[in-house]
Image (spheres, rainbow, N blue to C red):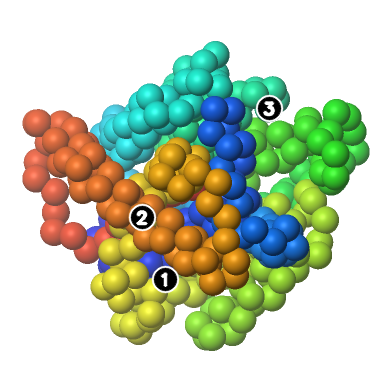
Amino acid sequence: MNEPRQDLPALTGMRIIAALLVFLCHAVYPMTTGNQTPTPPFADPGITENLIWFFSPGGSIGVSFFFILSGFVITWSWRPGRGTGSYLRRRVVKIMPNHVVTWALAMLLFAAAFTPNYGLPNLFLFNAWSSDPMWWGGANMPAWSLCSEILFYLLFPLLIIPIRKIADNRLWLWAGIVVAAMALTCVATLTLLPGEPRFPGEPLALPQFWFIYMFPPVRLFEFVLGMVLARIVLQGRWPRLGVTPVVLLLVVAYAATLTVPSPWSLTLVTAVPFGLAIGTFATANLRGKRTLLGTRPMVWLGNVSFGFYMTQAIVLYWLSPTLLPGASYGVLGGTLLIIGLTAVNVVAGWLLYKLVEQPAMRHWSRSKKSPPPAPRHRVEDTSLTDVPA
């Protein structure tokens, strides 16, 4: 596993689709943020209700995709003998400058007025470790998922040791074991955790939702699944699946999340389709096949997707209600508003990528004593960072 890794542009392009699903989940029905109360883009409550039904799975499965992709990408980029310190330095520099800047902006612009006591847990990325729902969305709300990413980064140097020792002919078996563990976690959520309190109409009690969705150790299964799948591709054991059947499987999986109840729909329903998509698009790139996801515009969007994810709360919960207070329209107007907000958020994500993420990576990701990096023959070393609800 010491040879240079070939670039996998399709995986970079996939990231913007997952980030967009998270964004649309929040855009069709923005949450109340205390001093700011965003209005749904559509004046007709029936349209809003239907859009919530259709896009609400996007938030949870978008995050799940990024966690699986994180395990795959970091394993793909890993080199035996690479110093743990340099690896951790790069991972921390990849996410923390973006996180700190968006946290500060959120607190300054709107969040301090309604979560003054919960800003610091969000800043130091331990808010998702608490079962108190007041902690989850403090300050810059989407940053809760970085609590899990930080745990992944810290444990990766330990996890890669046994995963590299798995015999080639047992890799698919272990991928299945990880998925089975995810299913057992769903069973444990429903049988072992309290069924109260719960928000009216919500399928899961708050302790159940926190455990299956927010609690970082539980999300390790998705990360480990990505790691095992990366080894399968590295060892040349990925089946020759067509891109079109895999895309159709993703469509079916999304449709299933609209009918399958929680907690099964949050991560389990899409885990296998996401894993198959990541591995299939990766092997397509390895064979030299060009895909739409690997085109230059999609790769550009994929590179700014982490910034896009991190700026969404600022755009949806501060900029939109500040510039367009009470804005609610018909079908055409509401659609144009969502398209406009998406475009604004792409620009905001690009600015964060250009002005914060790239300079931070250039100046801080490597020790001054480190040799210059080798020519780029690898997938973009990102996870939502490689993430993103």
Real-space Cα separation, disc 3 to disc 1, in angstroms: 37 Å
What amino acid is at disc 1? Ala
Residue 344 is tagged as: 2
Residue on which the image places disc 1:
282
Q: Does residue 114 sit above or below 314 in this rendering?
A: above
Residue under numbered circle 3? 133
Residue 96 lies, with reference to residue 383, above or below; the image says above
Instruction: Say which amino acid is labelled 3.
Output: Pro
Q: In front: 368, or 206?
A: 206
Q: Nearer the viewer, residue 136 or 69?
A: 136
Q: Position of residue 98 (x, y in %)?
A: 32, 37
Q: Nearer the viewer, residue 70 or 172?
A: 70
Contact between labelled residues 2 and 3, with CB atoms less than 8 Å apart: no
From the image, state whether disc 3 or disc 2 is nearer to you. Answer: 2
Mark 3 and mark 1 lie on one chain; the one further toward the N terminus is 3
Say which quarter of the image contains residue 115.
Answer: top right
Q: Quadrant of residue 257?
A: bottom right
Mark 2 closeness class: few <14, some 14–19, many ≥20 residues within 10 Å: some
- Say which residue appears at 68% left-offset and 27% top-offset: 133
User: Residue 241, how many percent across, how many down?
Assistant: 54, 82
